[in-house]
Amino acid sequence: MNWLPADTTPDAAEQLHRLLLVRSSEARIRMACDMFESARALVIASFPREVAQDPVRRAIAVLTRMYGHDVDGTFLTKVIDDLRRRLGGSDHRQVL
């Protein structure tokens, strides 16, 4: 088991893994989506009101907060520029 949580004993992690495996694929996907949406909501709640209420700035800020350390900076800039083109003209430098 390669995903052993740092704050869980090996026995508890193994039990959790077994419990997850008995769920249907649909249930596991639904759980993952629900957890992602919860994390996204927490991230958005941490933004200043003017960022949270602007769809472009919010999308860019969520992207940056959730993936900014895991994605190459050049690629991230291209994605941000694409978001600005598709969603509107907000300046992404305001939220980075």
Image: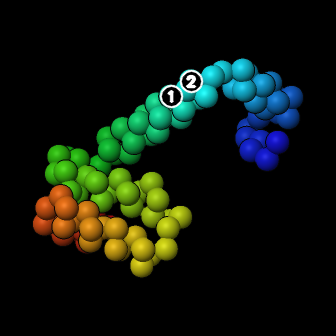
Q: Which mark is residue 30?
A: 1
Tell me where residue 73 appears, x and y as whole percent: 44, 75
- Contact between labelled residues 1 and 2, with CB atoms less than 8 Å apart: yes
Image quarter where the C terminus lies is: bottom left
- Vertical position of residue 11 compared to residue 57: above or below: above
Residue 24 can be seen, yes or no: yes
- Which residue is depicted at the point 13% across and 66% down? 89
Q: 77 or 96: which is nearer to us?
A: 77
Q: Secondary structure at mark 2?
A: helix
Question: Left of 35 or right of it: where is 87?
Answer: left
- Which residue is depicted at the point 34% across and 74% down? 78
In the current view of this chain or complex, which residue is farthest to the bottom?
Answer: 74
Image quarter where the N terminus lies is: top right
Inspect the image, locate mark 2, and give the three-letter code of the amino acid beneath it. Ala
Q: Which mark is residue 50?
A: none
- Which residue is depicted at the point 26% across and 71% down? 81
Q: Which mark is residue 27?
A: 2
